[in-house]
Amino acid sequence: MPRNLSRLLRPRSIAVVGGGTWCADVIAQCRKIGFQGAIWPVHTSRDNVGGLPAFASVNALPDAPDASFVGVNRHATLEVIAALAARDAGGAICFASGFAEAAAESDDGADLEADLLAAAGDMPIIGPNCYGLLNYLDRAALWPDQHGGVPCQTGVALITQSSNIAINLTMQTRGLPIAYVVTAGNQAQTGLAQIGAALLDDPRVTALGLHIEGVGDIRALEALAAKARTLGKPIVALKVGRSDHAQAATISHTASLAGSDAGARALLARLGIGQVHSLPSFLEALKILHVAGPLVSNRIASMSCSGGEASLVADAAHDSDVAFPPLTPTQSTSLRAALGPMVALANPLDYQTYIWGNRQAMTDAFTAMMSSDLGFGFVVLDFPRDDRCTAAAWDLVIAAVEHAREVSGVPMGIVSSLPETMPEHIALRLVAKGIVPLSGLDHAIDAIEVAATLGHDHPAPEPLFLTGPQGSGTLSEAEAKAALALRGVRIPQSHRAQTPKDAAHLAAEIGFPVVLKGEGLAHKSEMGAVKLNLLSREAVEAAANAMACNSFLIEEMVTGAIAELLVGVTRDPAHGYVLTVAAGGVLTEILNDSQSLLVPASRTDIHAALMRLQIAPLLAGYRGASAADIDAVLDNVMAVQAHVMAMPVEEIEINPLIVTPNSAVAADALIRNGDP
């Protein structure tokens, strides 16, 4: 049952247990940020901690504290947590390390964590092994170190599993109002998703940012995403681990394509959580969401007074999912009136320096660019150094942007090409005016792309399928195909044979050409155990004699292929079952052209994933060639998914699924039920 975190996150009284430097720093940070509630140090032998009179024990406190920072060693932490729970305290930050995260180095770490949970009972705890939390709305700091944030009225909430990254995020000078920073630590009791749900309940929080090292509770993350949809508060996540391989040793292509990172990306996309891949993009995306909210589309307009800047914008957006719609005749007419005959009209627009310093002309030009069907518009503007230059003329640009935003009703920003040319005081001023200050072109484009994806309607997805595999062992190819055929997968006509002579005889029954495969090998092509387009008995027998195999599979040769696909499902313990569609055949790993979804996936979503593949033009009929039977492909993919949900396995792979103008046939298949 979820615990109520409101007292811990928004305390009116704080107990600081321990006497070290860390605890004195918590008291100092509370004073510095302007906390107005009671601060009660607790120490067994000292009369004073951090300049405040100390109490000898938790039981000696004048009242049950709303929040407590427990800064003693791990063994003493158990006693303190038990005492706080007995007093009905609101919750505690467990600062000490040496619990489950140190289980490899310490024999009792996992046991101590279990004892900690027992001591806490129903009282919420965050950690252990975490720095704590900062509440900039209510000026509360259960935080044993420096931080760079300042109090605010509204802002975004940040949760991270790294205390050091949390400190770094507070030091940002990008004009992003931060309402909360919470470090989750071990998440022994209270997970990242539960913390996020409690933060979203605060009406002063506009958006939520998650730095995720690992997803512990998928159901809790599903619930968090559902709450965010209900409240209309977007979530952006930076999930680390893109370079890790989920499975170092695999017997299928699917497992290598659909590693843990693919599962994480598929999970976040399914839940409607925006995804970024760097801390700067993380902060810039949250800035857009705080000021403007999710963008209604990815159609944007860019304006700058330099052709070089316009080119930089176009290049930055080249591989992103943002679009610069061409100018309409009405826009062109209005722009020509504002800019004169010498300016080439386009989007991105280089309005040149003819109108620099002319507020009315800039206002007219920016307003003309901002058609109502855009999702966002921005002006590229780098501010001069305060210590050496003056920026009076730049104020005219800000005023023109403000007017264009008000007239068009479309969110607008000012983007600096370099992060350092968007000073913090300017960024804060722009936020106050409802203009998004974005720092750095590349990260700005990343942020716009993410904010546009969050503007799409994200209906509540079905709960993920998480049942573990049943049984063990790996089926032979023939057994795997037979099992999948029962679900509706189309397989070739085939026979099994024990000797080369029998293989030749059965090949004649099927009819030539045929394919001969040696059984008992995981990667048959690499082992020379697949021979294609055999046209006679003699060819089949000779090929079988050349294979070091004790049994053979003879199949009809599927002809007329338009493309070869891989269709697979692998169980990712961290994220559920990952459904992968990819360019298939022997070049699967070289092409590395894949899309991942989570089970269950809808037929519509699977079709969209197929169309995102680089080989999608082949499926659609490239350069006048016949188009693939996409419905047949989808039938096969849905059948594979149905098998997984009816008989959970460790992994399934069809590679290749040979796609023709009127069929899709599983030429090879693998099913691994689990580790034997």
Image (spheres, grey):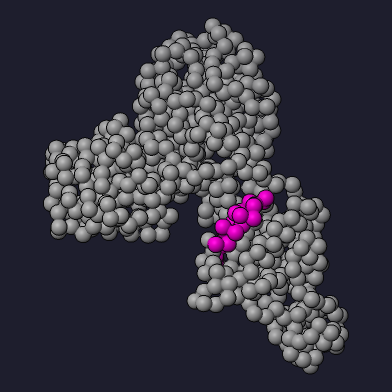
What is the quadrant of residue 194 in the picture? top right
- Above or below, 474 relative to 68: below
Task: State which quarter of the image contains the N terminus.
Answer: top right
Q: In this view, does 106 lie to the left or right of 438?
A: right
Is residue 598 within the magenta segment?
Answer: yes
Q: Where is residue 430 in the image (x, y as percent from the top left)?
A: 28, 35
Question: Residue at position x 30%, y 54% from top?
Answer: 328
Position of residue 405 relative to residue 549, above or below, is above
Residue 598 visible in rendering:
yes
Give the residue furthest to the top.
62
The quadrant the C terminus occupies is bottom right
Return the residue found at the far bottom: 538
Magenta-tinted stretch: 592-611
433 horizontally vs 10: left or right: left
Judge by depth and name the residue closer to the eye, 531 or 299.
299
Pick the front one: 1 or 634: 634
- In the shown orientation, is residue 221 left or right of residue 548? left
Is residue 570 part of the magenta span, yes or no?
no
Q: Position of residue 497 (x, y in %)?
A: 85, 80
Residue at 60% from the left image edge and 54% from the top image edge: 605
Residue at the image position 30 percent from the left and 30 percent from the top:
432
In the image, 26 versus 493, the foreground residue is: 493
Point 78% across, 52% down: residue: 646
Estimate the x, y position of residue 75 in percent, counting from the top left: 62, 26
Query: Is residue 143 in view from this perspective?
Result: no
Q: How many marks?
A: 0
The foreground one among 242 and 24 is 242
Q: Where is residue 431 in the image (x, y as percent from the top left)?
A: 31, 34
